[in-house]
Amino acid sequence: MARARVLADTHILYALYKKHHWLMRGATFSSLHLEKQTAALLAGVDESVFKGIEDAITADRFAFMSAFLADFYNVDVLDGERVSDQVIQASWNVALGASAKGALDCVQAWLTDFRADLPRIDVPTLIIHGDADRTLPIDATAIPLAKSIAGARLDVVPGGPHGLIWTHAAEVNSALLAFLR
C-alpha cells in the first residue's frame, strides 16, 4: 500500500506542477471543468451555484473549505476507513495557504470551457473518475468527457469521491498501470 500511495502522491504533485498541461509521458490526464448551464450543456451547473460558492468563500473561507473537503473526500462515508482526520487537516492547511483572492478567483476559473480543445487530443487518454464524486459528478463530467475524446478509456472507481487519488490509491494505481502497459 505504501508504494501505491507514493505513486498517487507523485501524480498529484505532477498535476499541480504542470497545471493545465494535457500530456504526461504519452498518457493524458484531463477533466471537464464545471460549466454554467447552457442550452448546449443541459447537464451543466446552474450559475447560482457558483454565486453561492463565491458568497460562502467571501463570508468564511475557512468554514467553506471544511465543508468542501468533507464532500471532496466523502467524509461521512469514508472517514476513518479510507481517509484520516490528519489527511483532511493537511488538505485544509494547503487549501488555506492560498490567498483569499486566489480562492475566490478560482471559482470563475472553473467556468473555463475546454470542450473545443478536446477533439485535438490525439494521444491515448485515460479518465479515472469515482462514481461517488460529489464535487464533479460523473454524469456531468467524466462520461461526457470520455465521449468527447476519440478512443478515450473511462475507468470508474466504485465508491470513489473526488479525492479518490488518496482514498482509492490502489485502484487508481492499478488503472494507471494497466493503461500504461
Image (spheres, rainbow, N blue to C red):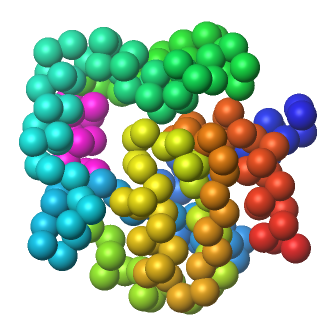
* In the displayed structure image, the side of residue 78 where residue 89 appears, left or right: left
Q: Is residue 142 left or right of residue 175?
A: left
Residue range corresponding to the magenta coloring: 101-110
Q: Main secondary structure of the magenta part?
A: helix
Q: Position of residue 12 (x, y in %)?
A: 62, 44
Is 129 rendered above or below residue 26?
above
Q: Position of residue 58 (x, y in %)?
A: 14, 21
Of residue 151 and residue 109, the one placed in the foreground of this image is: 151
For the point 42% across and 88% down, which residue is it? 119
Residue 38 x, y percent position in the rendering: 13, 67
Which residue is located at x 69 percent, y 77 percent?
Answer: 26
Residue 13 visible in image: no
Is 177 on the left-hand or right-hand side of 61? right
- The quadrant of the image that shows the C terminus is bottom right
Front residue of 31/75: it is 75
- The tally of labels here is 0
Q: At 53% across and 88% down in the image, what residue appears? A: 150
If the image is split into quadrants, where does the N terminus sit? top right
Tell me the quarter of the picture where residue 96 sits: top left
The residue that appears at 89% across and 39% down in the rendered structure is 3
Was residue 109 drawn as part of the magenta stretch in this picture? yes
Q: Position of residue 148 (x, y in %)?
A: 44, 81
Q: Is residue 85 above or below residue 102?
A: above
